[in-house]
Image: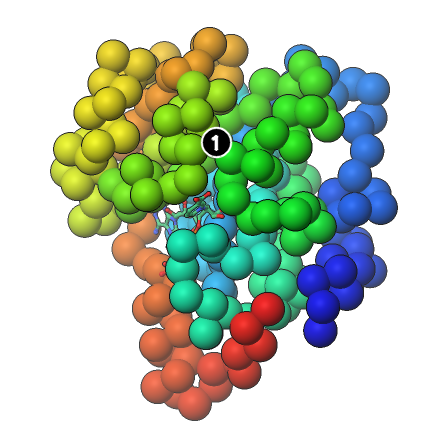
Amino acid sequence: MTLVTDVEAGAAAGLRFDRETLGPPPAWPGMRIGLLGGSFNPPHEGHRHIAETALRRLGLDQVWIVVTPGNPIKEHGDLAALSERLSATQCIMNHPRIKVTGFEAALPTAYTARTLDFLHRRFPGVHFVWIMGGDNLASFHRWQEWRGIMRGLPVAVLDRPGFRFRAMASPAAMTFRRARVDETQAGALALISPPAWTYLTIPLADISSTQLRRQRQAAGTGAESSGD
Ligand SMILES: Nc1ncnc2c1ncn2[C@@H]1O[C@H](COP(=O)(O)OP(=O)(O)OP(=O)(O)O)[C@@H](O)[C@H]1O
Ligand SMILES: O=C(O)c1ccc[n+]([C@@H]2O[C@H](COP(=O)([O-])O)[C@@H](O)[C@H]2O)c1
């Protein structure tokens, strides 16, 4: 199955923002949109928890879930097909203001810096915020153009069991320590000029896709890997 076919499958399932349907309603400039990128292999309650928490605590109009065709720095050997991950993520989220998208598969690369360039060009005037778990802040300095990402839009980091101290001591947190916004001000983060990031302490969700894949394998119900 090609990437484009996967995107079309997403569109057929009613999922938005594929190459054909990506188009801004005129009311979008000025809106506050959170972007939660991920593999969602498979999606789980922790993803819904952080998407809903970010929506509320950051005062966002919407959260767009950006399901990656493949994390550019992870092995893809056990990665389920994009269409499967899109459908499962839609089922888990099931929220009118949380939109599940597969548009990244139609871009030339899956690097987040490029995805953000695309979104800023495509949706001028929208206040985007990048959302991620504490594990990703801990390794953020390995991402392509991570400093540019931090300087390009506000970033909200949501607490994850076992990662708080590693995240706060990370090269990214240290480099941008003066740009940290106290979480009591998180409701205004989307409107603050970057670099600006906050760390949200939240009820912890001790769950991961890795755990779920292991459980499924142990139960003999793991989906076949497609390696898309
Ligand atoms: N339990 C959780 N608490 C907080 N953030 C989370 C949690 N699970 C995932 N995230 C965040 O959601 C985004 C997407 O995560 P991803 O799809 O990689 O899930 P994962 O559970 O981390 O997967 P894996 O175990 O395969 O690495 C990332 O920013 C990640 O940090
Ligand atoms: O751009 C990069 O270099 C980069 C490196 C690692 C992860 N990302 C993005 O981070 C998001 C979370 O990825 P994951 O696999 O941890 O769910 C997802 O949108 C990835 O594309 C991006």
Which residue: 45% across, 28% down? 149
Q: Amino acid at mark 1?
A: Trp
Which residue extends farthest bottom?
A: 220
Q: Quadrant of residue 169?
A: top left
- Along the line of sight, the residue nearer the viewer: 133 or 120: 120
Left or right placement of residue 33 versus residue 124 in this view? left
Total marks in image: 1
Which residue: 51% across, 11% down? 191
Packing grade of label 1 (10 A; few <14, some 14-19, many >=20) is many
Residue 145: x and y in percent read: 42, 33
Left or right placement of residue 196 versus residue 82 in this view? left
Eyeballing the image, is 96 above or below 210? above
Q: Would residue 56 be seen by someone viewing this image from the given angle?
A: no
Eyeballing the image, is 146 above or below 47? above
Residue 139: x and y in percent read: 28, 44
Which residue: 34% across, 76% down? 214
Image quarter of the C terminus: bottom right
Q: Would residue 225 be seen by someone viewing this image from the given angle?
A: yes
Indicate the colouring scheme.
rainbow
Which residue: 65% across, 42% down? 99
Residue pointed to by mark 1: 130
- Secondary structure category for the residue under label 1: strand
Image quarter of the N terminus: bottom right
Ligand 2 contact, mark 1 (Cβ < 8 Å): no
Left or right placement of residue 118 versus residue 17 in this view? left
Q: Quadrant of residue 181?
A: top left
Residue 159: x and y in percent read: 29, 39
